[in-house]
Image: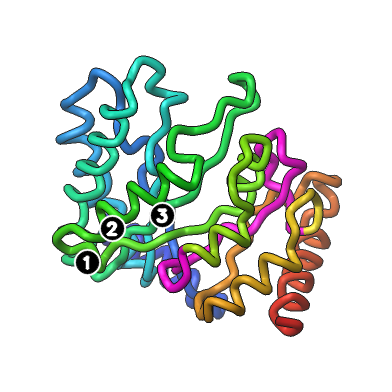
Amino acid sequence: MEYIFENIKNEVEKRGLTVFQTHGTMRTFRENDEEYNTVTFPKNAECDLKASRILGAKYCVFHPGSDLSNPNATPEEMRFRARRAFKMILPFAQENGVKVALETVGSNWNLNNKMDFFGGWDEYKALFDDVRNSELGEWFVCCIDTGHINLTAQHNQPTAAEFVRRLGKNVACLHLRDNFGVIDHHRPIGAGTTDWEDFFAALKEVGYEGTYNSEGSFDYISPELMIDTADFTVKTIKNFIERY
């Protein structure tokens, strides 16, 4: 494993780039599968954090879990599983010097736009606070996914800008992307309905000092224009940074 990721890091550095964040195990827990929840997930997460350390990343992003994949779980079970999952992996975060970043989540078009259990502000913040206030909680931070948050506007949830203002210095990394508030498109910023003026203003207000990571699909116009679309996205982000 170390050999593989050391080679990746070397290739990245040859191109004059750095790895700031990675994405960890997508499924934090599974309904009625305690072996996965207490053995497989933490082991996978340990590997994720080791790989992140080798690559030089400061943060490894994890989804909090969702009732969309656990349809029979009660709210109490959802909260218990998610809090247990993250507390189990914080020792690996400390050991590798890589912080675990809790990603904001949204809603699912394929399930009548049902909102993720942790997609709303109240459940997301309650989960974050519980883990943050636990032992080794200093290794737990927030990742703002603007596309996910934009999907929850139909559920009367705060905007991405408001999430930033409420979380303040806990915001450590970003997934910048856009959509029209219904389907989870990964479009570049400005190609949807997110209020980017307010979002970048909020980042300035809280003193955000991290990097600006785009998580867009750059072939949404045409595969032949992927490079141009990516280049335009970088220019757009830089323009907002310079203005705010």
Kindly tell me whether residue 236 is visible in this rendering.
Answer: yes
Residue 50's spot in the image, x, y percent?
Answer: 26, 59
> Toward the viewer: 126 or 217?
126
Residue depicted at 61% across the width and 56% down the height: 160
The N terminus, quarter of image: bottom left
> Toward the viewer: 26 or 159?
159
Residue 105's spot in the image, x, y percent?
Answer: 51, 43
Q: Find disc 2 in the rendering and name its residue.
A: 49
In the image, residue 120 above or below residue 22: above
Q: Is residue 214 left or right of residue 226?
A: left
* Residue at the extreme bottom: 242
Kindly tell me whether residue 14 is visible in this rendering.
Answer: no
Q: Kindly report the distance in space between the C-alpha atoms of the residues bearing marks 3 and 1.
A: 14 Å
> Sequence-wise, which precedes: disc 3 or disc 1?
3
Q: Does 188 lie within the magenta span? A: yes
Residue depicted at 49% across the width and 49% down the height: 104
Q: Does 95 lie within the magenta span? A: no
Mark 3 residue type:
Val
- Label ID, residue 61: 3
> Sequence-wise, which precedes: disc 3 or disc 2?
2
Q: Find disc 1 in the rendering and name its residue.
A: 96
Dot 1: few (<14), some (14–19), or many (≥20) neighbours within 10 Å? some
Q: Mark 2: which secondary structure?
A: helix
> Sequence-wise, which precedes: disc 1 or disc 2?
2
Q: Kindly report the distance in space between the C-alpha atoms of the residues bearing marks 1 and 2.
A: 7 Å
Which residues fall within the magenta stretch? 167-189
Residue depicted at 41% across the width and 54% down the height: 61
Residue 244's spot in the image, x, y percent?
Answer: 70, 81
Residue 189's spot in the image, x, y percent?
Answer: 74, 58
Mark 1 residue type:
Asn
Q: Find out whether the residues at labels 3 and 1 contact each other: C-beta distance under 8 Å.
A: no
